[in-house]
Image (cartoon, rainbow, N blue to C red):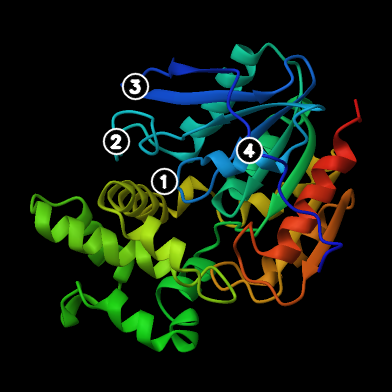
Amino acid sequence: MSDLRTFYPAIEPYESGMLDVRDGHQLYYERVGTPGAKPAVFLHGGPGGGSSPVHRQLFDPTRYDVLLFDQRGCGRSTPHAELHANTTWHLVADIERLRELAGVERWLVFGGSWGSTLALAYAETHPERTSELVLRGIFTGEPEVIEWYYKFGVSEMFPDKWERFLAPIPVGERGDLIAAYNRILTGNDPAAQLEAAKAWSLWEGETVTLLPDPTLTVTHGADHFAIAFARVENHYFSHGCWFESGQLLRDADRLADIPGVIVHGRYDMPCPARCAWELHKRWPGSDLHIVEGAGHAFNEPGILHELIKATDRFADSG
């Protein structure tokens, strides 16, 4: 275990601010590392998860200049939990605005879970702006993957936690849990909304790691986090993430000239390993690492090891 790579030391931003992306949204962003070093952008998960100080530590600060930001409606971006003008394609446009703010022509794009989805959408739209991709916990947005997590599949692995996830939903509405949760999360009853938000958020927080992680129960169960996480994520899944059927895999040929690394836990519950396998087959320039004895979370030891190796590998490339 001592040979496993782990986080770089904690680091504070050298710059931070709010970017007006119109539509009423203000995005929080920060930059860490060495100004003028290799540019990179970090895309957090969810949707609705927000970035965290520990995400800064995935990059060698002497060799990278990293921009991290909170996507629309979550983290320190405002308005909190806002769904208006909050779609995948708004976020892709936001990444371009942030690239222009950073003053770089191309950058490494790093994304995990929903961040991998957004990274693929961005890179397939703007391949000329993407120097490399580092992706973890691949989620390609197909309806069957969403159903695996919110209808039947993971429910069989976590029956105790699934029962808690079902609890806020009347029995007669459990045939379509995404729609049932959407009704409550966008409704006018604050108490019911918070109860549903916490149930939604904890379902994910307590099923993403191979072994239980009590810190995720705390973070995902916090009111402020849960409201944004549940509302935004459910909003995206209610709309199929605004993708055409199979779009991200269909358009993977647009990544042909982009080198990349895919890291995926063998026992990833939210995102079955098939997603990573299919992407790798369609993207010849990718290296796939399926990590044994790991789930979905970026900080599980084997996954973290491969992610740090990947950012180190690309640190000195043009």
Q: Secondary structure at mark 3?
A: loop
Q: Earlier in the sequence, mark 2 or mark 1?
A: 1
Label ID, residue 48: 1
Q: Where is residue 33 shown, x and y percent of the image?
A: 70, 25
Observer-side mark, 3 or 4, equals 4
Q: Where is residue 7 shown, x and y percent of the image?
A: 71, 48
Label ID, residue 315: none
User: Looking at the picture, does residue 257 appear above or below residue 309?
Assistant: above
Q: Is residue 281 visible?
A: no
Residue at position x 8%, y 54% from top? 189
Q: Is residue 316 visible?
A: yes
Cβ–Cβ below 8 Å for labels 4 and 1?
A: no
Cβ–Cβ below 8 Å for labels 1 and 3?
A: no
Residue pointed to by mark 4 = 10
Would residue 235 be found to the left or right of residue 304 on screen? left
Residue at position x 13%, y 60% from top? 192
Residue at position x 71%, y 77% from top? 293
Q: Secondary structure at mark 1?
A: loop
Q: Secondary structure at mark 2?
A: loop
The C terminus: image quadrant: top right
Q: Where is residue 44 shown, x and y percent of the image?
A: 55, 44
User: Looking at the picture, does residue 289 appear above or below residue 222?
Assistant: below
Q: Secondary structure at mark 4?
A: loop
Observer-side mark, 3 or 2, equals 2
Residue pointed to by mark 3 = 23
Q: Distance between the Cα atoms at labels 2 and 4?
A: 27 Å
283 and 316: which is toward the camera:
316
